[in-house]
Amino acid sequence: MAIFYVRHSLNPNKTVKFNITLRYFVIKGEEGEHMWTLEIGTTHKDINGDPISSKKIHKVSANNLDQIIEEAIADLCFQIDWTPLVVDKEAPFVYSFSPTGDNIPIASNIEIIIKENLPAAGIDLFSAKIILNNSMLDFDITDKVIVEGDPYIYTLKWSPELRIYNTYD
């Protein structure tokens, strides 16, 4: 059994303790197949003050373990009263970007890191548009940008598809 704590991103003063256990059973049969079972629970009460039932998930494998834990914790946390929540007053900001400076080689890729400090609601990229301006035209490259990270720090990467190295007058 392992113990871990979860904190809501808009309530930095409240943490909830969770227990997690991963067990295996041998199923009778020709090959004596192992079946892994995961159990996640908390002694914290739900919104109404009632006990929260633990989650038991069968047929866990190394391929789906992270996703199963994430979904189970999200479901259990949804039942908890996290108030009072603080108001997210600060906008996300560009933490870093590259390349920088003048006379950037045309073969350069672009990388931008966007962050939001806690407590925060997180960065919502759903309606974001990424516009590249070459000092003459705007290009919408939103669907060509690779986004990695989580709601509090995202890395946006863009590699131009067409790289023009020579121009002629």
Image (spheres, helix red, strand yellow):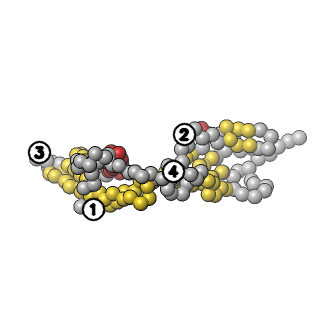
In this view, the residue in front, 29 or 49, is 49
Question: From the viewer's perspective, is the residue at label 4 or at label 1 nearer?
Answer: 4
Question: From the viewer's perspective, is the residue at label 3 or at label 2 nearer?
Answer: 2
| Residues at discs 1 and 2 in contact (Cβ within 8 Å) | no
User: In the rendered structure, which amino acid carries the disc numbered 4?
Assistant: Val
Q: Please give the residue where the numbered disc 1 appears in the rendered image.
A: 2
Q: Position of residue 6 (x, y in %)?
A: 37, 57
Gap between marks 1 and 2 measured at Cα: 35 Å
N-terminal of the pair, mark 2 or mark 4, is 4
Q: Please give the residue where the numbered disc 4 appears in the rendered image.
A: 87
| Residue at screen point 20% across, 49% down | 35
Q: Please give the residue where the numbered disc 2 appears in the rendered image.
A: 126
Q: Please give the residue where the numbered disc 3 appears in the rendered image.
A: 29
In the picture, measured across the screen, residue 60 lies left or right of residue 87, that is left
What quarter of the picture does the N terminus occupy? bottom left
Question: From the viewer's perspective, is the residue at label 3 or at label 1 nearer?
Answer: 1
Gap between marks 3 and 1 measured at Cα: 31 Å
| Residue at screen point 29% across, 48% down | 46
N-terminal of the pair, mark 4 or mark 1, is 1
| Residues at discs 3 and 1 in contact (Cβ within 8 Å) | no
In this view, the residue in front, 49 or 24, is 49
Secondary element at image label 2: loop
Secondary element at image label 1: strand
Gap between marks 3 and 2 measured at Cα: 49 Å
| Residue at screen point 70% across, 51% down | 107
In this view, the residue in front, 98 or 56, is 56
In the rendered image, the vertical position of residue 138 relative to residue 151, given as above or below:
above
What quarter of the picture does the C terminus occupy? top right
In the rendered image, the vertical position of residue 17 relative to residue 27, given as above or below:
below
Q: Residues within 10 Å of mark 4 (few under 14, many from 20)?
A: few
User: In the rendered structure, which amino acid carries the disc numbered 3?
Assistant: Gly
